Image (tube, rainbow, N blue to C red):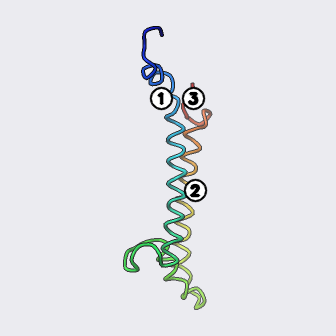
């Protein structure tokens, strides 16, 4: 390693090991952002009410829950849960060497 710059040493030794950590952090951050977006949209602070969004769909179906038709809110809420759980699983699999993650 003599004669190599510190940048070259870091690129050779650190960057390959950071890939899985970056993927895991990105997937978890995406899941948190999705939940935050849905919550803001549900409260009416997100996208326009005419824009299709899961938070807007949960809020629009809220009045139908008491009348016995909870499908709209349930489907939108279930999709939020499934997508966030899938993001967490992908992030976990990226860092777990027993399930295909890359650690050296």
Identify the residue at horizontal 50%, vertical 22% (top origin): 13
Task: Find disc 3 in the rendering and name its residue.
Answer: 103
Chain-order first, disc 3 or disc 2: 2
Above or below, comparing residue 47 to residue 36 in the picture: below
Q: Which mark is residue 85?
A: 2
Horizontal arrangement in the rendering, residue 76 relative to residue 96 (left or right): left
Residue 18 image offset from top left, x and y in percent: 51, 33
**If the image is split into quadrants, where does the C terminus sit?**
top right
Identify the residue at horizontal 58%, vertical 91% (top origin): 67
Identify the residue at horizontal 54%, vertical 88% (top origin): 63
Circle 3 Cα neighbour tier, 10 Å, few/some/many (<14 / 14–19 / ≥20): some
CA gap, disc 1 and disc 3? 12 Å
Identify the residue at horizontal 54%, vertical 39% (top origin): 94
Eye-nearest disc, 1 or 2 = 1
Task: Find disc 1 in the rendering and name its residue.
Answer: 15
Circle 1 Cα neighbour tier, 10 Å, few/some/many (<14 / 14–19 / ≥20): few
Above or below, comparing residue 38 to residue 86 in the picture: below
Q: In the current view of this chain or complex, which residue is farthest to the top?
A: 2
Above or below, comparing residue 86 to residue 74 in the picture: above
Helix, strand, or loop for circle 3? loop
Helix, strand, or loop for circle 1? helix
Of residues 93 and 24, the one nearer the viewer is 24
Q: Are marks 1 and 2 in contact (CB under 8 Å)?
A: no
Chain-order first, disc 1 or disc 3: 1
């Amino acid at each position: 390693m003599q004669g190599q710059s510190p940048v070259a040493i870091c690129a050779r030794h650190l960057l390959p090991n950071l890939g899985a950590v970056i993927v895991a952090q990105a997937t978890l951050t995406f899941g948190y952002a999705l939940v935050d977006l849905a919550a803001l949209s549900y409260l009416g602070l997100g996208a326009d009410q005419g824009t299709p969004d899961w938070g807007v769909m949960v809020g629009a179906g809220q009045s139908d829950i008491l009348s016995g038709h909870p499908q709209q809110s349930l489907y939108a809420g279930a999709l939020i849960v499934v997508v966030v759980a899938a993001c967490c699983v992908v992030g976990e699999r990226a860092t777990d060497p027993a399930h295909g993650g890359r650690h050296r």
